[in-house]
Amino acid sequence: MNEMTFEMEEHHSDLGRVEISPEVIEVISSIAASDVEGVASMRGSFAAGVAERLGRKSHGKGVKVELTEDGITISVYVVVNYGVSIPEVAQNIQDHIRQALMNMTALEANEINIFIVGVQFDAKEKLQEAPEVY
């Protein structure tokens, strides 16, 4: 099994080279996206959900990274809170991921694609807004 890594060409030295695996980029992107206001949760695969229920924490949840000759493509799958501006939240996610990658790895992604896969309704707010029944 050949695992792909991305070599940071800007940081060659006499000591060796620095390589970053796609999983590291997934974790950075997932945490950056989760920190954006309006994001309710990240959507992972079925296998990640099962693993999480068994106690294994999935830090790269909801993010897929592809390394190609053209560069890095990041796909982010999120659930947003009801009532937020989806275009604004998506733009903020892209900005947060781009900034986090630049700060932590000095890498830039060619594409950061945002997929809104659901809307989270806050059950507590709905109960508080409902009229009382006698």
Image (spheres, helix red, strand yellow):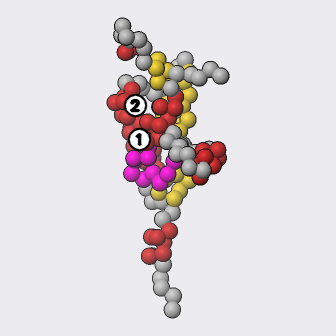
Note whether 33 is above or below 122 in the view shown. Answer: above
Left or right: 66 as drawn, with respect to 31: right
Which residue corresponds to mark 1? 32
Q: What residue appears at the point 38 percent right and 39 percent down from the top-left corner?
A: 96
State the residue at coordinates (43%, 36%).
28
- Return the residue at label 2: 101
Q: Is residue 90 above or below residue 53?
A: above
Q: Where is the N terminus found, in terms of image quarters?
A: top right
Q: Residue at x 52, y 28 (%)?
A: 22
Residue found at the very far left of the displayed protein: 103
Could you say where residue 77 lies in the image, as x and y percent from the top left? 54, 44
What separation in Å lies between label 1 and label 2 (alpha carbons)?
9 Å
Assess whether mark 2 and mark 1 are in contact (beta carbons under 8 angstroms): yes
Please state the horizontal and vertical placement of residue 75, each as a whole percent of the image. 54, 36
Taking the spot 49% from the left edge, 21% from the top edge, the residue there is 6
Counting from the top left corner in percent of width and height, residue 76 is at 52, 40
Question: Helix, strand or loop at disc 1?
Answer: helix
Residue 116 in view (yes/no): no
Q: Which residues are magenta?
A: 32-43
Residue 39 on the magenta span: yes
Q: Residue furthest top?
A: 14
> Which of disc 2 and disc 1 is earlier in sequence?
1
Category of crowding for the residue at label 2, using alpha-carbon neighbours closer than 10 angstroms: few (below 14), some (14–19), many (at least 20): some
Hey, what amino acid is under mark 1?
A: Ala
The kind of secondary structure element at disc 2 is helix
Q: Which residue lies most toward the bottom here?
A: 134
Q: Position of residue 84 (x, y in %)?
A: 43, 56
Q: Which mark is residue 105?
A: none
Q: Residues within 10 Å of mark 1 (few under 14, many from 20)?
A: many
Relative to 70, residue 54 above or below: below
| Residue type, label 2 | Leu
In the image, residue 46 sits, relative to residue 64, either above or below, namely: below
